Amino acid sequence: MADQFAVIGLGRFGLSIANKLYESGRDVLGVDVNEERADEAQSYVTHSVIADSTDPEALKSIGIRNFDTVIVAIGNDIQASILSVLLLKELGVKKVIAKALNKLHGEVLKKVGADWVVFPERDMGIRVAHQLISPKVLNFIELSKDYSVEEVKIPEKMTDKTLRELDLRAKYNLSVIAIRHHDDIFISPSPDKIIDHGDVLVVIGENRDLERFANLE
Ligand code: ADP
């Protein structure tokens, strides 16, 4: 079923995924072994049930194989998280996303069939450190170990110039793919576009070049 999600484990992480999907109009089944957690989640998801995801019969009885995507957001119980992913894949769930606590846990989750493993604490830590190193970077996506896309606040001395004058490609080896001006976004901006005070550039390039650019005064 398209746009049908199940989230197993309704702690802070699971519930925030579940609720965001629900608010975006998706059908979300919340699952937790803990009755209180399942009850509390009622108003944040389409429907929530009490079930133990390490029990194959329980998974079958809630019709888990009918869900397109199942997110395993079990917190500290590594054994339960691994067993749940294994069972979900055995039952034929197409896409299983699982939260890992550490690298080894993540590797095991991949081995038992998780399609996507997420490391929320590690990733948030990296984002916070990134913000501290480059406060002008509002957002970023890592494309690979060496390349990223970043949203960078324009340094003051670069304002009131055109993209051609700034010539970021030659000077910093960076390509500007969009400009955000207040609430407007200009995709593939023309070289004659003038950069205003407070504009945000969306740039793509090598991390060391991005860092050099984002740390300009
Ligand atoms: P967070 O750090 O995201 O708040 P928690 O460890 O508090 O994570 O939450 C994990 C949730 O997963 C808990 O509500 C717990 O009851 C639930 N959970 C743990 N094991 C199972 C299981 N086998 N089946 C279903 N839910 C489970």
Image: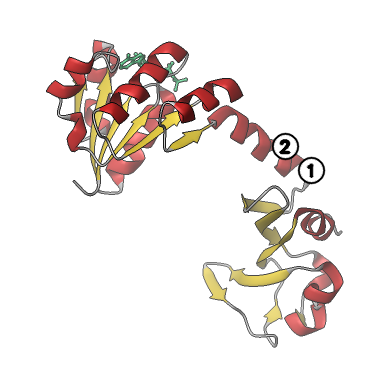
Type of residue at label 1? Ile
Q: Which residue ends up furthest to the bottom in the rendered image?
A: 192
* Camera sees residue 9: no
Relative depth, front residue between 59 and 28: 59
Q: Which mark is residue 171?
A: none
Q: Quadrant of residue 91?
A: top left
State left or right for residue 112 relative to residue 43: right
Across and down, in percent, residue 31 comes to 26, 23
Instruction: Give above or below for 171 relative to 66.
Output: below
Type of residue at label 2? Ala
Dot 2 falls on a residue whose secondary structure is helix
Categorize mark 2 by other alpha carbons within 10 Å: few (<14), some (14-19), many (20+): few
Which residue does the image show at 67% across and 55% down from the upper left? 148
Q: Which mark is residue 129?
A: 2
The residue carrying mark 1 is 133
Across and down, in percent, residue 97 comes to 40, 35
Across and down, in percent, residue 94 comes to 29, 40
Which residue does the image show at 80% across and 68% down from the upper left? 173
- Ligand 1, seen in the image, is in the quarter at top left
State left or right for residue 134 relative to residue 199: right
Whether ligand 1 has any atom under 8 Å from the Cβ at mark 2 is answered as no
State left or right for residue 213 relative to residue 4: right
Which residue does the image show at 22% across and 38% down from the upper left? 67
